[in-house]
Amino acid sequence: MRKQESLTEHLDWPLFGALLTMLLMGLATVYSVAYNEEAPSLFDFSEKYGRQLFWILFSLFLGLLVFLIDSDIYRKLAIPIYASTLVLLVVVLFMPAVHGAHAWLGVGSFGVQPAEFAKISTSLLLAKYISGLTVKQQTTGTVLTASSILLIPMALILLQPDAGTFVVFTSFLFVMYREGLTFDPILLKFVNAIPGVRYKETWVGSHFIPILFALVVLSVVTLLLDSVQFNISLFGLDLELSGSSGVIFGLLLIYVASWLIMQRFSTRRERSRMMVVLTLGLLIGSLLSFIVDKGFDMLKTHQKDRIELFLGLREDPNGDDYNRNRAMAAVGSGGFLGKGYREASVSSVRSNHVPESETDFIFCPFAEEWGFVGVVVLFILYFFVLFRIIVIAERQRASFNRIYAYCVAMILFYHFAINIGMNIGFAPVIGIPLPFFSYGGSSMMSFSVMLFILLKLDAQRKDVLR
């Protein structure tokens, strides 16, 4: 029998306090940026700051309900919760488009984004599935199953389309890697299908994160070379290369050079092993380069424009790149100490110099008002939250709790890093809110519920055996 204890006896007060602090700071920033002299009351629900207050109070109410429910329910109902969000992601595709995306369910002015809650359901199911595996069960089938848990909602979200949430879902890959669920089983089957080759592990699967980073770099290089034309004369042949063809040619040269070096300085077994790795690298790199080059042409015009502007392939400061340009100007205008509360001029709703300054670009008015010092405080607060979540994750007895905690940490980190990157020109504009700051009901509710589930799991961590 579980002992009856106080509701807050094992609540992680540092994390809860940081959550309340962020909510208050976010509300103050929304009030400042959207202030209306004709309706100054914070409780005027016709204004954005009034509605934001409502969403905060409603989210805290949902959080209280979450905290009252026994923590076992989240593991037991992970599959039904996941299935329900998939149904909503399908239904939303048939709803009228809002800002060019079929992402909202609602009536009148009240609407929610199922994709926001899909992050929670995917975290729960992924934690349930991986926590039930042993080391010996990490086979091709289990890796594909875990990957499918991510890919199904990602595919539905991409159909909306919602590029920002799609990118956030890639954070779960790092959680899989953290739990030892690599792609070794799949790669081993491919490698061992080669005659005369028998390996027990692959270098590729064991180095997933650096390889993922290398593939991202390769994708960027492919796009950068897309606008560059250069001719090469080789063995009497004149080659004209650009984009993917240039990357593939470079990979081929690396492959040949590596083969020649290994013939001189390695044993037959080492050569065999390295040639398999290099061949896989050449094939995967060439395929990715080709897909990026051709897939880029299939993107919508505004999506291509954002990527080209971010990579510096073209400039349009007063056109397609207006948002990012104005955002960087607003952040820079804050200086060291800022202009003061409600003194933002570049990023206020009234000036309209920074569109969506109360949602995706909420960091701009905050930086303009509080300057570099305020930004440092904000960064410390977010890093403290991430650090606290990791501490909570590592003290869990149940692997389900630990995996869910790391899912929450990665989701928050992605949102924080990409949103700030959008505001200072380090990331393309893909529409990602700043957790607990940006105006909006769906994101506020989903982040709050996500964190309160973690607080509840942690509060009952001593009641589980493993």
Image (cartoon, rainbow, N blue to C red):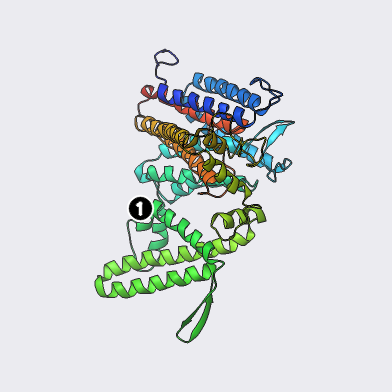
Secondary structure beneath label 1: helix
State left or right for residue 19 relative to residue 209. right
Quadrant in which the C terminus appears? top left
Residue 329 position by quadrant: top right
Closer to us: 195 or 466: 466
Report the amino acid beneath label 1: Ser
**Residue 153, visible in the rendered structure:** no
Q: In this view, does 461 lie above or below 348?
A: above
How crowded pointer 1 is (Cα within 10 Å; few <14, some 14-19, many 20+) is rated as some
Quadrant in which the N terminus appears? top left
Question: At 70% across and 32% down in the image, what residue appears?
Answer: 106
Question: At 59% across and 29% down in the image, what residue appears?
Answer: 342
State left or right for residue 71 relative to residue 95. left
Number of numbered discs on residues? 1
- Which residue is at the far bottom? 236
Residue 85 position by quadrant: top right
**Residue 390, visible in the rendered structure:** yes
Closer to us: 221 or 458: 221
Closer to us: 15 or 171: 15
Q: Position of residue 134 (x, y in %)?
A: 36, 41
Q: Position of residue 346 (x, y in %)?
A: 61, 39
Q: In this view, does 133 lie above or below 448?
A: below
Q: In this view, does 225 lie above or below 388?
A: below
Closer to us: 377 or 177: 377
Pointer 1 residue? 206
Q: Where is residue 36 in the image (x, y as percent from the top left)?
A: 68, 27
Question: At 39% across and 54% down in the image, what residue appears?
Answer: 210
